[in-house]
Amino acid sequence: MALWGGRFETKPDELFKQFNDSLPVDAALALQDIEGSIAWAKAIHRAGVLNAEELAKLSSALSSLKSEIANAPALPLSSSDEDIHSYIERRLIEAVGDLGKKLHTGRSRNDQVATDFRLYARAQIDARLLEMKEARRALIDLAECTKSIVTSGYTHMQRAQPILFAHWALAYQEMLERDAARLLDARKRVNLSPLGSGALAGTTYQVDREQIAKDLGFDAPTRNSLDATSDRDFVLETLSANSIAALHLSRLAEDLILFASQEFAIVEMHDSVSSGSSLMPQKKNPDACELIRGKAGRIFGAFASLAMTVKGLPLAYNKDLQEDKEPLIDSMQQLSMCLRVLVRVLDTLKVREDCARNSALGGYANATELADYLVGKGIPFRDAHDIVGKLVRHAIDKSKRLEDLPLAELQSIDKRIDAGVFKSLELETGLARREIPGGTGPKAVADAILQARVRLG
């Protein structure tokens, strides 16, 4: 059912109709459209447009339709419906007759869709926040289970310094905690009510916009009708937060893919989140993490797509904005799947303690400890750095670890080295020396786990 057409003499071209209609996409906003319509019915009742009986009939019919849609696997869409608003209005008129035509009094599809979309964005943000909370919980649990496992930290993809595996897990928990904060902050700009803005200039009916906002759970009404009907900053901001979250998930997935490779062999992913090869029987592929990494590009694309759509639009509403739904809907669906699958990966992840420890023992990751040992002897750090560099070169030539070099060979590079050096080169010694807030010392990490759980709530 078209919601316009009185001034037109011919029907829309069929190809144009297919191009113009948005129902397959904006059907996702059906429940929000009904919520907004119930609130609008109350608003125009208060403004004297509807009497109490009419309000009751409309509210009852809309509530019944909402229940039907909420429990239906899919909407019975009709090719005659242009968008979700015309679908809801047609169904309403079928239920209550001409009374259904009164509901749109004082309202434009412009403020209607802006309201629906904000309600949808808010609900999706709330759902992602819960999923992020669960992913953070999985990371904290992983940290708890691995707080005694030593592994190597990396810079430039080269072994750098020994760390606790739990410290690695908590690093990603920090990222997801920031992601949650960004979404929560974006929600503040989402949670404003455009209803009552009309097409662009406001409505002539004296509706109580403050009460409409309260009825819909918004914090306040928007302040400018031109801006309210054409603003999609709230979508862009949400997509930006989604993109940064996807970036973090992609980095986490990349780490796990590397750690699960035979070259690293630090972790093993559960069979339930892995797949095999159609040709090579021995393969166990980290497909769950590879898809998380791959989905990031799709989520980034959603932000870029909408940004390019709105960058040159004049005020106020333009049909270009019909293209705003799909990026957010898809971005939210993909981010949701990534977060939920990640929890399965983390909850079933096996960390190989022996391989993790061997990675920390290799690559001369304790070289910094040796430099600090020399600093303790009164040697300036720059000189100590140079001495250790020569010792590492000597150890490489001998195909030995630093701790496996005899004392005499160590002293051939610098006489000030004594037998106490071997204690300083032990992994546990290096970790214990980093007992500062934010460090990888065992107590510091244990405290960080407790603090993360408190913040998680």
Image: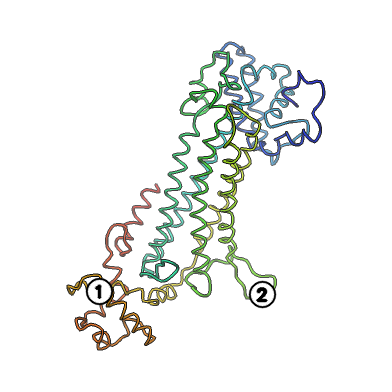
Q: Is residue 454 left or right of residue 288?
A: left
Q: Residue 293 in the image: state x and y as whole percent.
A: 56, 58
Residue 332 visible in the snapshot: no
The residue at 57%/65% (across/down) is 286
Residue type, numbered disc 2? Met
The label shown at residue 407 is none
Q: Residue at x 67, y 39 (%)?
A: 25
Relative image position of residue 228 (x, y in whole percent): 54, 27
Instruction: Locate residue 6: give its quadrant.
Output: top right
> Where 455 sits versus 414, above or below?
above
Residue 144 lies, with reference to residue 89, above or below; the image says: below
Q: Tag 1 or tag 2, which sits nearer the N-term?
A: 2
- The residue to which callout 1 is attached is 384
Query: Left or right of 397: which side holds 116?
Result: right
Residue 259 left/right relative to 45: left
- For residue 110, what is the image quadrant? top right
Q: Secondary structure at mark 2?
A: loop
Q: How many marks?
A: 2
Q: Residue at x 57, y 41 (%)?
A: 307
- Identify the element where label 1 is drawn: helix
For disc 2, the neighbor class at 10 Å (few under 14, some 14 to 19, many from 20) is few
Residue 225 picture quarter: top right
What residue did someone put label 2 on? 280
The crowding category of the residue bearing disc 1, from other C-alpha atoms within 10 Å (few below 14, some 14 to 19, many at least 20), is many
Which quadrant of the figure contains the N terminus? top right
**Image position of 335 (left or right of 60):** left
Residue 103: x %, y % from top left = 65, 19
Residue 7: x %, y % from top left: 76, 18
